[in-house]
Image: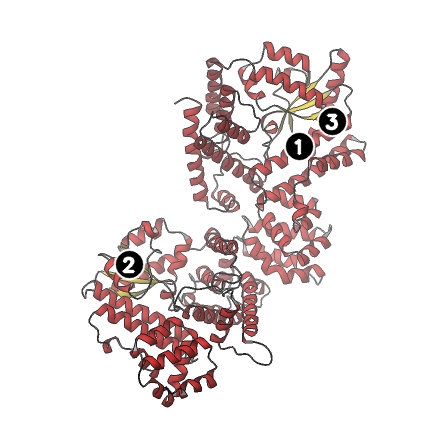
């Protein structure tokens, strides 16, 4: 067998051994092919490159001699009419394979640009759908239109794309899909309701869905819709109606957050699977970063600028750059990177025509990829090393541009050096949550005023700062907070250093400032906490001994009551800010936040009481949420003060200690209050002495205690003072709470109290339908149900969540019921805590003002509608369990 042509191929193209073997097989399989290779150098090159790049197309060449002819005439498109086959579907499949081969060969030879390649691939898919309509509907094309979505709609398919479609009109689309699936994976899941929705809808049904139910990502997807087959008039009507919805609505901050959150979840999933840095589509600096940024800017500005509405990424990117919506240098860099990354994607998928988006781990496979990309070994390095260097460079270019893309032109517009029109500036700021363009401009000017080191640094990082702020619940508040911190002059150098050396700390600061005025004030008073944001260890919750040491230090150095209180207040507020930051950043769940707040309160009381040096045994007993180790940001400290003594001198000494403790901790005004100490749960309430002796408590509980007091004592727990007295108090409590029978009369008493609370206690102005504390199925329902079950089944435990676990373990509560009650408790407590921070003060119901509800929802990483729906879901189920377990209904 002559091998002259293959020897020539080896000499000219240096194909890998697998391609050489394929050439030998081809020559052996097709008579006369060697001679054709010898006489047609272009054919030899095309076959060699195909054999090098694609196993699937090499197999096509092996079995289909007509495919060789396609490579001999690359300038001539394959015509479906030229195929002679027994079955039309078989002919369609053969035509698709040959035309894809022709496009791939021209691509590998460098004859076509990326635009020509993806347009050609999209045209093949569109023709398949057109033929499928004819074959599947017996030649009829009226009454049903096929709408191309995604890359098909954008005329930018790759070699192994699914083809995303929707069907509009009437009739059965399944025969169309069955024919088309002979050639492609056909995905119709972008339709309303996805797989659960009807495959075909009328145009009126689509319009009704868009107007009432469509999510932001669905409008984003409609940017790329176009009619590709079937009834052309109906398809055009669909696209017109879709355009009215996409470009006729404002794309607001909540829409933007939702689509950004979807992208973030995708990236988190890739990171968990360990492929985030290898994925060239959805990974860091990948194809999706470019496409996503372009689509968002189209949604923000396309309503008032029709030139931006192209469904094709590169066309839209070029228009964004030329019109000033994107910095021209950034647009050029993204264009180059996108072309490179799409070429990598094509080479990966050509191997087996499979949906591959990750650079292979195997070094040999990566080297083959580099060769398919056109890289060759030379004196300066291997093909693989040069390819990987270019890949890293493009990915490293895309990600930073993606992060600053939306805001750099805004800053240039504020400085008067951007062609962006005022209405475009306003639209972009509004989409990212900044309500007032002028106020934003002024804040930017103040942050960069003069030629100081601070302003120069801020000029460099402001695009990122604006991006970080835009992810917060209230970007305007966050921007004003940053301006306050940087303009105060107090330890500003620490802030500058943090922004320069720790981008993560800067990002966290932006999120926290855009969440809560409380946190802004905290950072203003405690700038050292800003630097701690970048160090996980510095943000970790301190131990009890560390907290006691801090309390002791601030008290030891001062003698005046006012000075001691101020120092103590400063220390406590700093730790509350640290705890709140962990909560907002997602580093603490609701239980950890409650534990941190409780430990701080315990250490404060322990330190103060120890410093007072009571002359009689004295202890502080925590009640309510404090006793249950479930403090919230808005919680008071319910306490009972206990001493051990029998004489009038003992009584007087104990009252003096109690007054001193309350004076130091509670202060004289809200401004100097460390904690609000509530002693109202003591025997006789406000009419009784502040501190009660252990013997008087024993006598009172034995003779006078009411059912509500027995219920309250379920959560009692000594937290400061004499340990032995605390143990004796708990022994007494065990006798009082768990010793006597818990009768039906006691159950009725508790039920009557709960019913009275439900009738009377929701404050005016708060929404009873969405009350987190007193609403049906909310915190109080869970707490009362848990405490009643504890008393009936004699299951001690101070905390609600801990008690639910104990009740389940003891068989007193079904696991499903415990889960339902626990889910409601966690949701309501987490949301209540977050609303306190977002509002800047106490609030026990979901806010009624739409803007407040939107900010709370953003902080909870959801939407207002979803937040309310989640409240209804968890509280409805909780109430059902509560009524069965508590009321017996």
Q: CA distance from mark 2 to mark 1?
A: 62 Å
Q: Quadrant of residue 311?
A: bottom left
Picture quarter with the C terminus? top left
As helix, strand or loop, the secondary structure at mark 1 comes to helix
- The tag earlier along the polypeptide, 2 or 3, is 2
Closest to the observer, 462 or 370? 370
Identify the residue position indicated by label 1 in the image: 601
Residue at x-position 31% and y-position 54%: 207
| Label 1: few (<14), some (14–19) or many (≥20) C-alpha neighbours in 10 Å | many
Q: Quadrant of residue 635?
A: top right
Closest to the observer, 125 or 21? 21
Identify the residue position indicated by label 3 in the image: 609
- The tag earlier along the polypeptide, 1 or 3, is 1
Closest to the observer, 584 or 426? 584
Query: Residue 561: image x %, image y %?
Result: 77, 30
- Number of callouts in the render? 3
As helix, strand or loop, the secondary structure at mark 3 comes to helix
Closest to the observer, 832 or 162? 162
Residue at x-position 60% and y-position 81%: 379
Query: Residue 464: image x %, image y %?
Result: 59, 59
Identify the residue position indicated by label 2 in the image: 167
Q: Do the numbered discs 2 and 1 sit on residues whose CB atoms are within 8 Å?
A: no
Picture quarter with the N terminus? bottom left
């Amino acid at each position: 067998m002559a091998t002259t042509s293959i020897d020539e191929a080896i000499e000219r193209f240096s194909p890998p051994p697998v391609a050489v073997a394929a050439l030998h097989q081809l020559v052996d399989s097709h008579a006369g092919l060697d001679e054709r290779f010898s006489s047609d150098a272009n054919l030899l090159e095309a076959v060699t490159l195909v054999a090098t790049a694609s196993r699937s197309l090499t197999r096509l060449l092996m079995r289909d001699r007509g495919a060789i002819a396609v490579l001999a005439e690359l300038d001539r498109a394959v015509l479906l009419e030229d195929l002679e086959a027994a079955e039309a579907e078989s002919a369609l499949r053969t035509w698709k394979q040959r035309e894809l081969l022709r496009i791939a060969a021209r691509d590998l030879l460098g004859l076509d640009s990326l635009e020509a390649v993806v347009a050609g691939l999209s045209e093949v898919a569109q023709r398949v759908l057109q033929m499928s309509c004819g074959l599947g509907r017996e030649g009829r094309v009226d009454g049903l239109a096929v709408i191309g979505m995604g890359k098909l709609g954008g005329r930018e398919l790759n070699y192994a794309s699914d083809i995303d479609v929707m069907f509009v009109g009437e009739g059965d689309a399944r025969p169309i899909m069955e024919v088309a699936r002979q050639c492609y994976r056909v995905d119709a899941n972008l339709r309303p309701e996805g797989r659960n929705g009807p495959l075909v809808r009328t145009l009126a049904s689509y319009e009704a869905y868009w107007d009432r139910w469509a999510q932001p990502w669905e409008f984003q997807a409609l940017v790329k819709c176009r009619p590709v087959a079937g009834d052309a008039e109906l398809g055009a009507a669909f696209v017109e109606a879709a355009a009215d919805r996409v470009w006729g609505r404002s794309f607001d901050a909540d829409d933007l957050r939702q689509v950004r959150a979807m992208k973030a979840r995708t990236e988190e999933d890739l990171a968990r699977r360990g492929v985030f840095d290898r994925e060239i589509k959805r990974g860091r600096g990948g194809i999706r970063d470019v496409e996503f940024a372009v689509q968002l800017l189209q949604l923000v500005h396309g309503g008032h600028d029709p030139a931006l509405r192209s469904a094709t990424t590169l066309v839209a990117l070029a228009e964004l750059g030329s019109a000033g919506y994107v910095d021209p240098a950034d647009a050029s860099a993204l264009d180059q990177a996108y072309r490179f990354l799409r070429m990598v994607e094509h080479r990966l998928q050509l191997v087996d025509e499979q949906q591959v988006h990750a650079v292979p781990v195997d070094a040999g496979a990566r080297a083959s990829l580099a060769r398919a990309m056109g890289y060759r070994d030379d004196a300066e390095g291997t093909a693989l090393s040069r390819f990987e260097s270019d890949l890293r460079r493009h990915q490293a270019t895309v990600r930073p541009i993606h992060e600053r893309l939306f805001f750099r032109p805004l800053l240039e517009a504020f400085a008067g050096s951007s062609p962006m029109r005022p209405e475009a500036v306003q639209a972009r700021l509004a989409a990212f949550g900044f309500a007032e363009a002028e106020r934003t401009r002024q804040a930017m000017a103040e942050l960069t005023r003069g030629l100081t080191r601070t302003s120069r640094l801020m000029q460099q990082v402001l695009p990122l700062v604006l991006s970080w702020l835009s992810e917060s619940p209230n970007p305007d508040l966050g921007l004003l907070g940053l301006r306050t911190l940087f303009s105060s002059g107090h330890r500003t150098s620490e802030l500058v250093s943090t922004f320069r050396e720790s981008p993560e700390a800067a990002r966290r600061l932006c999120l926290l400032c855009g969440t809560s005025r409380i946190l802004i004030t905290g950072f203003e008073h405690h700038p050292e906490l800003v630097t701690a944001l970048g160090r996980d260890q510095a943000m970790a919750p301190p131990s009890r001994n560390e907290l006691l040491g801090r309390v002791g230090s601030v008290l030891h150095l001062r003698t005046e009551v006012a000075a001691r209180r101020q120092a103590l207040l400063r220390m406590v507020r700093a730790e509350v800010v640290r705890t709140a930051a962990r909560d907002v950043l997602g580093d603490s769940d609701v239980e950890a936040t409650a534990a941190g707040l409780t430990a701080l309160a315990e250490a404060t009381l322990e330190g103060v009481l120890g410093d007072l040096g009571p002359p009689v045994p004295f202890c502080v007993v925590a009640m309510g949420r404090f006793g249950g180790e479930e403090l919230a940001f808005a919680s008071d400290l319910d306490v009972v003060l206990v001493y051990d003594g029998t004489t009038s001198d003992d009584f007087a000494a104990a009252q003096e200690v109690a007054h001193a403790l309350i004076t130091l901790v509670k202060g004289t005004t809200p401004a100097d209050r460390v904690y609000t100490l509530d002693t109202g749960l003591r025997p006789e309430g406000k009419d009784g002495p502040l501190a009660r002796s252990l013997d008087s408590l024993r006598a009172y509980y034995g003779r006078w205690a009411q059912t509500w007091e027995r219920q309250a004592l379920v959560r009692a727990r000594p937290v400061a003072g004499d340990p032995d007295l605390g143990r004796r108090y708990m022994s007494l409590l065990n006798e009082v709470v768990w010793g006597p029978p818990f009768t039906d009369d006691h159950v009725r008493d508790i039920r009557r109290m709960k019913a009275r609370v439900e009738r009377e206690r929701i404050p005016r102005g708060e929404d009873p339908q969405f009350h987190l504390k007193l609403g049906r199925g909310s915190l109080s329902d869970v707490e009362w149900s848990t405490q009643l079950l504890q008393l009936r089944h004699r299951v001690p435990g101070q905390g609600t969540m801990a008690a639910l676990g104990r009740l389940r373990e003891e068989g007193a509560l079904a696991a499903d019921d415990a889960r339902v009650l626990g889910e409601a408790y966690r949701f309501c407590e987490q949301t209540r805590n977050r609303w306190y921070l977002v509002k800047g003060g106490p609030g026990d119901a979901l806010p009624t003002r739409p803007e407040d509800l939107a900010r709370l929802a953003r902080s909870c990483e959801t939407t207002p509608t979803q937040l309310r729906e989640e409240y209804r879901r968890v509280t409805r189920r909780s109430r059902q369990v509560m009524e069965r377990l508590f009321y017996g209904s």
